[in-house]
Amino acid sequence: WPMPSASEGMSRTGNHQMIRSLLSIPSFWQTEARDTIPVHPESDSTLQEGDIVFRRKRSAINCDSSCFWPKSSDGLVKVPVNVSTEFCKLLVYRTWIAEAMQEFTTLTCVQFINRTTETNYISVVPGESCWSHFGKIGGMQQVGLMKTGCMSKGAIQHEMNHALGFLHEQSRSDRDNYVKIMWEYVIAGEQGNFGKVNSNNLGLPYDYSSVMHYGANDFSNTSGKATIVPIPDPSVPIGQREGLSNLDVAKINKLYNCCSNVLHKPNDTFSSVNYPSSYPDNSNCLWLIRIPQHQIFLQFDAFDLQPSPDCTSDYIRVYDGSSRNSSVLLDKLCGMGSLPSLVASRNVMLVEFVSDEATAATGFQASYSQGEDSASFTELGDISNFCLANIHVQN
Ligand SMILES: *[C@@H]1O[C@H](CO)[C@@H](O)[C@H](O)[C@H]1NC(C)=O
Ligand SMILES: *[C@@H]1O[C@H](CO)[C@@H](O)[C@H](O)[C@H]1NC(C)=O
Ligand SMILES: *[C@@H]1O[C@H](CO)[C@@H](O)[C@H](O)[C@H]1NC(C)=O
Ligand SMILES: *[C@@H]1O[C@H](CO)[C@@H](O)[C@H](O)[C@H]1NC(C)=O
Ligand SMILES: *[C@@H]1O[C@H](CO)[C@@H](O)[C@H](O)[C@H]1NC(C)=O
Ligand SMILES: [Zn+2]
């Protein structure tokens, strides 16, 4: 068997491209993605898994919100993960896995958290291929990472993104406008990996630089012959596994209907949706500011919310911490005017914006910067510390 190597799946592309993503309805022909050929197909446990997956596919095909991970009351989509301690044995594995998940946490409303007792969760296990289910299936679901096949940031993100509900970019319904599949070079029996599905493209463009796009030579049975050729320009790079593309990020936030954001730069500016045009009705958006090590200073550069008695209609509220249970720095505020600067006691601050059904104003614009004081605070459950209890590991 010619084995697609990890490097075949990792041709580099610039970050110039932006689009992609797709969708999430599991197709009739595939309810899990296997992204590499098993090392020992005859003994591969995914055959067993495949059977389990097969029996579940009926419920997945009529995909409703149960295929997706639920949003919690703070606007974030928390996905519990248990990473096998097998990956703690080598620094390079721990680092890739932590960095891969941290990037979702930083750039999207999807937050991978350390599983404690949650019923629905992802179990990241060593596998003989790299694979995942599409979307949330209920209960424990595995993501398989082959130590020699998908240990890179983007390759891990690729599998995690399947579990969030994304298919391969080249499976999109409109893919024939963007790529040509060279069936004559696809390894016999692997044609199913190149199917096209009736995908939900989320109104966002095809993305050659998605981590969900296969590389040109993936599953090719002839050295030097591509299985996927971009059209009209065959030289467009595909298959990057450096990290989420801009469109990967946009698609995740769109699929999960998130107006909430995580801000991680030492200083930044953000504003209500559509600012300076009117903000939408019935929104409830959160901005979690989480910077390394320093206190946060926040100021509103513009503020115009529909006034109401006690600000029951539309309002801003700011918390000194990462959840709506944290202490309040600024309670319900509406109307117009200038606001005092706010200072968080640590490196985390949460800004909440709520609007009711009647819109009457432009919203707000705010900026923050970091203070001098080091006031770092590691949240419990941060997935980047999944090996915390395994200190006797080799580097
Ligand atoms: C994580 O998985 C391991 C085995 O894979 C299991 O022993 C452990 O109890 C799990 N922990 C949690 C919190 O799910
Ligand atoms: C590659 O696969 C195609 C179709 O699966 C087959 O027709 C062809 O003979 C194969 N080529 C080689 C070199 O194995
Ligand atoms: C904001 O952060 C950037 C680096 O991200 C830095 O170059 C710039 O000086 C900062 N500006 C302020 C006002 O702190
Ligand atoms: C916030 O508090 C409520 C009730 O006091 C509790 O049920 C909930 O789990 C808390 N949420 C967080 C994120 O701590
Ligand atoms: C994550 O969970 C594992 C058990 O699954 C535990 O050993 C480890 O301490 C936890 N890490 C954090 C940061 O909570
Ligand atoms: Zn895949």
Image (cartoon, rainbow, N blue to C red):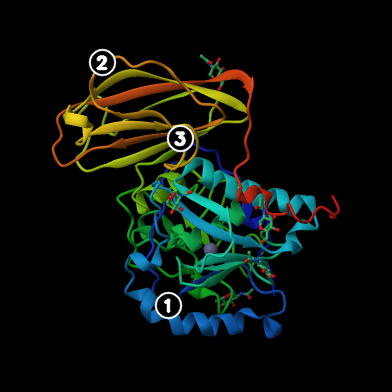
- Residue beneath the point at 27% across and 27% down: 275
Residue wearing tag 1: 29
Q: In whole angstroms, how far apart are the C-alphas of marks 1 and 3?
A: 50 Å
Which one is earlier in the sequence, the residue at label 1 or at label 3?
1
Percent position of residue 138, x then y:
46, 72
Q: Residue at x 58, y 50 (%)?
A: 101
Q: 10 Å neighbourhood of mark 3: few (<14), some, or many (≥20)? A: few
**Can residue 324 be seen in this snapshot?**
yes
Q: Nearer the viewer, residue 178 or 89?
A: 89
Whether 289 is drawn above or below 156: the answer is above
The amino acid pointed to by label 2 is: Gly
Does label 1 or label 2 sit earlier along the sequence? 1
In the image, residue 17 above or below residue 165: above
Query: Element under label 3?
Result: loop
- Examine the rendering and report whether any part of residue 153 can be seen: no
For label 3, the residue is: 327
User: The residue under label 1 is which amino acid type?
Assistant: Trp
- Tag 2: Cα neighbours inside 10 Å, few (<14), some, or many (≥20)? few
Where residue 198 appears, x then y in whole percent? 32, 67
Image height of 34 relative to 170, above or below: below
Q: Nearer the viewer, mark 3 or mark 2?
A: 3
* Residue 98 image label: none
